[in-house]
Amino acid sequence: MTTQLLSPATVPTSRRASLTADPRVLVVTGAAAIALTGVFVKLSAVSPATATFYRCALALPILGVMAAREWRRHGGIPARAMWIQIVGGVLLGIDFALWSQSITLIGAGISTVVVNIQVVIVPALAWVVFRARVPVRFVIAVPFLFAGIALVSGIFGGGEGGGDAVAGTVLALTSGVAYAVYIFLTGRAGGAGRPATQVLVTTVSAGISGSVVGSIWGGVDLTPGWDAMGWLVALALSGQVIGWMLIGFGLPKLPAEVGATLLLIQPVLAVMAGMMFLQERPTLIQGLGCAVVVTAVWMVSVPPRARVVTTVPVASG
């Protein structure tokens, strides 16, 4: 997970945060929290179903408290938005499960880089469905993105990660596609002003669907052990709570090109974290592929001129 951290039309605001915190620091810190999720999945040493189940379940108490406050202030979200979030959560759960398995095959760092395919899929969907204009930079970036993914897959130089590099890359790509469709759907959900409620609904749905899909590689282990549980708690807090809160507070206060560029620190930090904490050692060709992918993502995500960012999706990965 090409990364969460809210449905795109809903971003939380905080007067206190806006007065006391540099939004750039918030975004970078949130991106760092998301970047560590792959490390936590790998260190937990549990099945994809178990990782997805606990990632969502352990975040529910905190999200529930936040959603309850929203409910008292604003009421519930519209039924249409609720159903879109449920369907989106199914896709997000698929993303979580496939991405978790890809970590086993190609490593936490590389899998996080590959998941960023979503930055190409979302504009492509908008073009197909709404006939939206395709920017020239998008057309230029796509060949580079896929070339980078081919290099990352290990086809040209072997792969790290203790498994089939090609299969792991395919899983990460499929994960990114599921995440892209999730973003595309939830971006039209409505229900602004109730971000925690929407994330709560999505998280419940994702926990169920991800546990089912992840069961392909083993069922949910309800007693994973204390060591594993510690890493799963860290996964839930960093991926489902802290990351989206910090990015959600900071991103709307930054020009689009600044926010998009800062978010690119996530895949870079994911690769660095994999090397530092998991002793992952991508080959030279895979490292080159990561650099090409990040550059292509930058070409697609950074707009040609400044404008204020108003949306941020729930993080993949």
Image: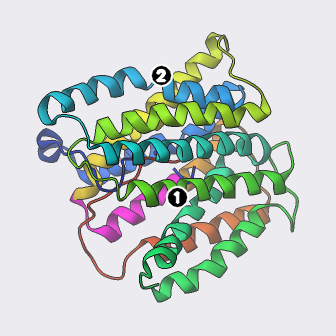
Residue hosting label 1: 181
Q: Give the dominant element type of the magenta stretch: helix, strand or loop.
A: helix
- State the image coordinates of residue 142 (x, y, percent, origin top left): 61, 78
Which stretch did the figure color magenta? 253-266
- Quarter of the picture holding the C terminus: top right
- State the image coordinates of residue 130 (x, y, percent, origin top left): 42, 77
Q: Element under label 2?
A: loop
- Can residue 92 be spotted in the picture? yes
Say the numbered circle drawn on residue 58.
2
Between 253 and 73, the residue placed more toward the observer is 73
Q: Element under label 1?
A: helix
When the figure is inspected, residue 171 is found, relative to residue 288, above or below; the finding is above
Left or right: 14, with 281 as reference point: left
* Front disc: 2 or 1: 1
Between 174 and 287, the residue placed more toward the observer is 174
Residue at 65% over, 36% down: 277
Count every numbered label the image shows and give the total. 2
Asked if the magenta segment contains residue 214, the reply would be no
Residue at 77% over, 69% down: 150
Left or right: 200, with 3 as reference point: left
Instruction: Give the residue type at disc 1.
Output: Val
Instruction: Tell me the crowding category of disc 1: few under 14, some 14 to 19, or many 20 or more residues within 10 angstroms, Cα based.
Output: some
When the figure is inspected, residue 29 is found, relative to residue 302, above or below; the finding is above
Residue at the limit of the structure toward the bottom, as seen here:
136
**Residue 177 falls in which quadrant of the image?**
bottom right
Instruction: Give the residue type at disc 2.
Output: Leu
**Residue 67 falls in which quadrant of the image?**
top left
Label 2 vs 1, first from the N-terminus: 2
- Can residue 317 be spotted in the picture? no
Residue at 64% over, 71% down: 292
- State the image coordinates of residue 151 (x, y, percent, origin top left): 77, 68
